[in-house]
Image (cartoon, rainbow, N blue to C red):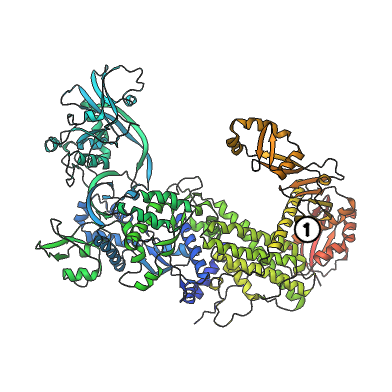
Amino acid sequence: MVSQAQFPDHDASAPFNFAKEEEKVIEYWREIDAFKTSLEQSKGRKPFSFYDGPPFATGLPHYGHLLAGTIKDIVTRHAHSTGHYVDRRFGWDCHGLPVEHEIDKKLGIKGKEDVMKMGIAKYNEECRAIVMRYQSEWRSTVERMGRWIDFDQGYKTLDTSFMESVWWVFKTLFEKGLVYKGLRVMPYSTACTTPLSNFEAGSDYREVADPAVTVSFPLVEDPKTSFLAWTTTPWTLPSNLGLCVHPEYNYIKIHDDERDANFIIHEDLLTTLYKDPKKAKFQKLETYKGKDLVGKKYEPIFPYFYEKYKDRAFRVLSDTYVTADAGTGIVHQAPAFGDDDHRVAIAHGVIAKDDSPPCPIDESGRYTSEVSDYVGVHVKEADKAIQKDLKARGRLIVQAQLVHQYPFCWRSGTPLIYKAIPSWFVSVEPAVEKLVKNNNATRWVPPHVGEGRFGNWIANARDWNISRNRYWGTPIPLWVSQDFEEVVCIGSVEELERLSGRTGITDLHRDKIDDITIPSQKGKGELRRVEEVFDCWFESGSMPYAQAHYPFENKDKFEKSFPADFISEGLDQTRGWFYTLLILGTHLFDSAPWKNLIVSGLVLAADGKKMSKSLRNYPDPNLVFDKYGADSVRLYLVNSPVVRAENLRFKEEGVKDVISSAFLPWVNSFRFFLGQAALYKKETGKDFVYDAHAPKSDNVMDRWILARCQSLIKLVKEEMDAYRLYTVVGRLLELIDELTNWYIRFNRRRLKGENGEQDTVAALNSLFEALFTLCRTMSSFTPFITENLYQGLRAFLPPAKDGEDDRSVHFLAFPEVNEEYLDPVIQRKFKALQSVIELGRVVRVNQQLPVRIPLKELIVFHTDAEYLEDVRSLASYISEELNVRDLTLTSDEAKCGVRFRVAADWPTLGRKLRKEIGKVRKGIEAVSSEEAKRYMAEGKITISGVELVEGDLRVIRYVETEGLEGKFESNTDGSVVILMDVEQRPELVSEGTAREVINRIQRLRKKAGLVATDEVDAFYSFESGLGQALSECIQSQSDVFLRTLKRAPRPAAEREADDKLILEEEQEVGEEKFILSLVWAK
């Protein structure tokens, strides 16, 4: 049954509280179940597919989320209004480090041992309990923001259906030979006790001060001579197995007089050893190529691994990765803690490819018993003690600090280390060409991010570590024999039940399936699942398939809607979600899983810093909503650089400005319409009803505003088709300005009925259509104000046709462009009118001449006859708006004192002319007006012997008013020139004074809360003996008052005793003060 809920009537006399009015809209949407109703209405239409990147519900929504939600809501609302069915389901990221880290902090868990002690089942139970901690806050904020999305049918990555599809994705990759296990040096979080992928490690770099030490390694063959190696990670020195030089660099052997020792170092890096090598006391003894040093043995710096590796390690190796920009040109090698170290050690036979290098730290980053002197000490805390030990043994040659950028764990905020870990990888490097091809087939907005930042990232993509040594996540579905020679990959619940014999499996988390075994097909006993779970990025990258439980359900529906028409997230996802989506989409279907992608920048605090709860450097979003409303936040965000992938410094004043620059004028225009429609009914006894098929108005103003409306519709459609949201708001503001400051301003008297009923209806119809067009065109961007104003306009619409539901603006189709109204000529003419009037207004402001003071003449100069004819066709509007008696149009330069001069863009011209720019700079002032004019016509000029052509200079018109009759002031926009006679003539002053009085009456009406239909009389009085001149002026200008107010003010002496007073106040016009009273008319 259709809800007959009624939206509250609009009270035009009450202040418009945007936040409170939005709450009324939300309540109305709830009553008519607006979102679900709109989905029902659009069933059967062409689908528009959209993927929502899942946030974690363990934290509260911030402005970054609000920005992403706004962009997604605008695009999907617009798609619905343009004839599509748009399934919008909210998603939740429920697994991984953000959840586990919270539990580790809560329970004081330091590593695997603690988890095993409490049991994975209990640990996962704790994780599950907090996963949806802020679900209600999210739901409330998203609704308050005006976003329409389905929470009830949303997906969660912890759902069995989701996890099963993730297994299907993995098995598909496994069967294509794209999964392998390898030992790699990976970024590792000691706080979260798990490896991270390379893109995660790159997401949080911070500036830190680390030790930078130079350590000696004495040669076995010559103990008095030592290699000098430099490192910023002293904690890796106990695992040292080699030293690496560059084969082609030059190294020198020196004798250090003060230390009485010999050192080998890169010839250009003596500054590492000495502050000023020129003053240092040393002698150069020998020079070597790096390759000549390879194989030389040195004494180990620590004894921990000497016995095991003495026959293979503790010698000089070579590789071209060594640089000469810092350090000593000799790099200490700890194969477990450096990617290059590991590669070089394998290449030189120090360790075998499949061997685990010495890695004497546990999963929490603490030394094991293999390093007996530092057992239980965290590696980062051991740096100082190791340096102290080296110093005591004379091996610490230089001790310094280095300030540099270092990667931190994006979740725990602790420094990462690099550590060799056996992990499961998805092959990416061989697919780079496909990744680039598939990405290039999509649209990025803005394009430079897809081509540059993201394009460069995928062009250098590395194999993806998808395994995590954790507990709360989707388990990797590999069951293996003890020797790993038999591996079974499971792709569904049904397959696991069939192969294991276990039935009734309803949960795929570790605590529910780790005990399940599969009988070996090769006589290897029972196969057990590997311990690892998936990186949560693998889950979010699988989201297109897993949210639909593909391929187990919704197969046809999914395949018809893949790839998605649209996705959007922030710039940080170029190395996150966008990247994983592309890898999996390419491996599964050789396609990017999106067609169009909007990438946004970061929302920062007003001071340019990252928004921080602890610093309290940004306003609470809910408080901003309560103060200004959500529409103003939406429009502020969408009209900012952040939608072009640039950063935005969020400023509350910017949100406030949206109200004053856009919404208040819009509401005032709407209220003005309501007042005029009420006035029309009062005077004619007829209700105004909008006629969409009314004959085309003969009035030029009507035709212009309707043409501007069609331009807005056309622009919004074109820009939204191209996903350029940021170009729309400027045009919206333009139309609001045109409606309030041009159309309404110029047509007040028509709308009040001055030209008869037929013309009034035409004006009301045009004004209604402009407001109606704004509501329908902007409903996706500002869903609240458009709904609110639409509900006020509904009363003037004809009854809906059968089957049409017009209860919400969001049920209406996006308007089609009416080509009949799209009049380029009338728009061109009004552009000229606006230019002339705006230039004239500036002159009046500069001369402190209010528009109410009539002036004698305005001269308009332009060289183009068509331009002057355009102005002539609208001359009455210009004369009235600028309050001038005579309007003169001319192309006679001499008559107007028009002159020309040339100007240059010096940086651009300087790059072209180089040394000759000085000559031009000196000679440009001597260029005459005639020469400048000739350059404008011919496109060439010679200045100080330097030939310049079209485009090198620009020509500027200006006016010399000396010699012109009258007191003229000029202004120009570079195209048209105006001259305004600013002399105040006595015969025109009285009319100006009358306009001043009218202004005071209208202000007092507004202060009294009166509306257009309220009929009142105005009375004036002066102190005894004063005000005679003003009184005479008022009486002599009665026609001016009648034309504007329909009633002339009268002396207070004519006021009757029983007149009901509304408001009385002292007023001031010029030097005169008088009492103005408003009383109800009889």
- Density class for disc 1 (Cα within 10 Å; few <14, some 14-19, many ≥20) is some
Above or below, comparing residue 961 to residue 292 in the picture: below
Above or below, comparing residue 331 to residue 735 in the picture: above
Residue occupying the point 16% across, 35% down: 313
Q: For residue 1010, say whether it is visible.
A: no
The number of discs equals 1
The image quadrant of residue 434 is bottom left
Is 952 in front, or is 718? 952
Is 808 in front, or is 1025? 808
Left or right, residue 433 beside residue 264: right
Residue under numbered circle 1: 869
Above or below, comparing residue 917 to residue 619 in the picture: above
Q: Where does the image place residue 225, in percent across and percent down from the top left?
A: 21, 23
Q: Secondary structure at mark 1?
A: helix
Above or below, comparing residue 761 to residue 119 in the picture: below
Left or right, residue 1007 beside residue 784: right
Q: Where does the image place residue 459, in percent across and percent down from the top left?
A: 37, 50
Q: Quadrant of the C terminus?
A: bottom right
Left or right, residue 610 beside residue 428: right
Is 108 in front, or is 332? 332
The image quadrant of residue 761 is bottom right
Tag 1: amino acid:
Glu
Q: Where does the image place residue 103, in percent across and percent down from the top left?
A: 29, 55
Q: For residue 233, say whether it is visible.
A: yes
Q: Where does the image place residue 967, in percent across and percent down from the top left?
A: 84, 45
